[in-house]
Image (spheres, helix red, strand yellow):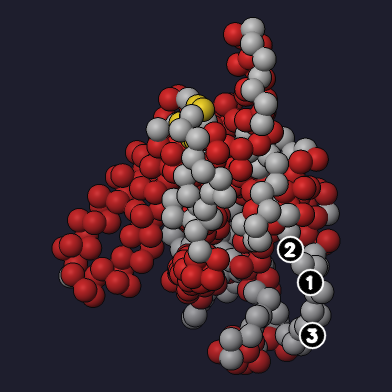
């Protein structure tokens, strides 16, 4: 499971550090005819990684099977243990009258690995990541304080964002908050809600969360498209971004670097929302329509054709995945990317509310004081005044 998740992360262009493949000596199974040995069993009990390829291949040998009428004869050359192994590894010939391919899967070997990942690393690291961001923001506020205006308010305001822009922003923001809360309830409900409030409350909350999550997702995707269409032209990187980074964005220190409509920090937020939000949306659609929109088998095949797994010391990735495996990978990827985006958005909420004086007005009323605009987006303010002067046929006021 972990091996496949690493490859999925690579397919989304997430940076990973090169790892060196560790060579492990395989035990001699010649005495057992290729079957597992006591050494294999003990290694698994010690928690060591044992290659199970030998267990999933060469299951049953009809040519060497004893006749069914003979003592201890086996039908088709496969013992009961071999039949269950074939079911586990998806190599059995199962015929169903209804249900399609998904109904043919009687035993799904990756289910337990997915469950252990979901209840272990995903909850642990995801939860600590969100808590860690909150702690860092509290410490930053205590050390740096609120970013205040250096100039007196002029009493003159300019339109920072139009009504349609604010609608798209709040549609995206509100839906993401609902999706984040309901997703966390589903992931952590059994750990916190069930033992505290009992099974009935937990059941109602999770059923409601699932309904909200599935339906609000459409609002999130609509907001994502609207925000991209309206703001992508303003979020193309340019040279002013280098100046913004060099001066710490005005957050560290007292400098206030010039910026256009969006500064470099806001551009990072924008592209994080677009790319990570897009990835979340695609994996979410795959979960809503798992049999119509499988993602990972074709992605893994493309990566294998490029030889990409070998770049980080991995073997070729599986290209034949059951519907259950597709859903498990999609759910794991969906949750991982969501945790990353939630951590980024928490920092964005801080800056847009208590972290910076006057920042909320930009998305609240859409109007900001000229002093605020001059301090944080001076190039944008100058361009706006110049454009207004050209429309009215008057000279732009001097600073």
Q: Confirm whether residue 335 shows in the render.
A: no
Q: Earlier along the polypeptide chain: callout 3 or callout 2?
A: 2
Q: Are marks 3 and 1 in contact (CB under 8 Å)?
A: no
Report the residue marked by disc 1: 19
Residue 215 located left or right of residue 234: left
**Among the 4 quarters of the image, the one containing residue 21:** bottom right
Quarter that holds the N terminus: bottom right
- Image location of residue 133, percent across then percent down: 51, 66
Q: Which residue is drawn at 83% across and 49% down?
A: 306
Can you tell which mark lies on residue 373?
A: none
**Mark 3 nearby-residue class (10 Å; few <14, some 14–19, many ≥20):** few
Q: Dot 2: what SS?
A: loop
The secondary structure type at the circle numbered 1 is loop
Residue 225 placement (x, y as % from top left): 53, 30
**Which labelled disc corresponds to residue 25?**
3
When the figure is inspected, residue 278 is found, relative to residue 68, above or below; the finding is above
Q: Are marks 1 and 2 in contact (CB under 8 Å)?
A: yes
> How far apart, in angstroms, are the residues tagged by discs 1 and 2?
9 Å
Q: How far apart are marks 3 and 2 (CA)?
A: 27 Å
Query: In the displayed structure, does residue 28 sit left or right of residue 137?
Result: right
Residue at mark 2: 16
Q: Where is residue 290 in the image (x, y as percent from the top left)?
A: 48, 43
């Amino acid at each position: 499971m972990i091996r496949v998740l690493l490859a999925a992360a690579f397919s989304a262009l997430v940076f990973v550090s090169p790892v060196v493949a560790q060579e492990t000596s395989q035990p001699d199974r010649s005495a057992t005819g290729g079957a597992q040995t006591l050494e294999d069993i003990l290694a698994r009990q010690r928690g060591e990684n044992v290659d199970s390829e030998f267990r999933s291949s060469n299951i049953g040998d009809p040519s060497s099977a004893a006749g069914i009428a003979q003592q201890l004869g086996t039908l088709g050359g496969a013992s009961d243990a071999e039949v269950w192994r074939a079911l586990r590894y998806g190599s059995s010939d199962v015929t169903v009258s209804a249900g399609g391919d998904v109904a043919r899967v009687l035993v799904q070997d990756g289910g337990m690995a997915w469950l252990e990942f979901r209840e272990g690393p995903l909850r642990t690291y995801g939860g600590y990541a969100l808590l860690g961001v909150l702690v860092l923001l509290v410490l930053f506020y205590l050390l740096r304080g609120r970013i205040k205006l250096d100039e007196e308010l002029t009493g003159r305001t300019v339109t920072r964002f139009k009504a349609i822009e604010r609608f798209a922003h709040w549609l995206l923001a509100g839906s993401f908050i609902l999706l984040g809360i309901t997703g966390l309830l589903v992931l952590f409900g059994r750990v916190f809600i069930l033992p505290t409030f009992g099974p009935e409350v937990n059941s109602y909350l999770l059923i409601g969360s699932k309904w909200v999550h599935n339906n609000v997702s459409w609002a999130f995707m609509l907001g994502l498209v609207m925000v991209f269409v309206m703001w992508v032209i303003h979020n193309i990187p340019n040279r002013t971004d280098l100046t913004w980074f060099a001066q710490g964005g005005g957050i560290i220190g007292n400098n206030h670097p010039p910026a256009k409509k969006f500064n470099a920090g806001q551009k990072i937020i924008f592209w994080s929302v677009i790319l990570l939000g897009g990835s979340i949306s695609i994996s979410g659609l795959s979960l809503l329509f798992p049999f119509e929109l499988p993602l990972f088998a074709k992605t893994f095949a493309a990566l294998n054709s490029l030889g990409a797994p070998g770049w980080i010391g991995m073997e070729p990735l599986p290209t034949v995945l059951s519907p259950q495996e597709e859903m498990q990978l999609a759910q794991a990827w969906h949750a991982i990317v969501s945790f990353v985006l939630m951590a980024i958005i928490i920092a964005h909420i801080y800056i847009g509310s208590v972290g910076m004086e006057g920042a909320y007005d930009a998305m609240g009323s859409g109007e900001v004081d000229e002093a605020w605009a001059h301090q944080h987006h001076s190039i944008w303010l100058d361009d706006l005044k110049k454009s207004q002067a050209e429309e009215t046929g008057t000279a732009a006021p001097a600073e």
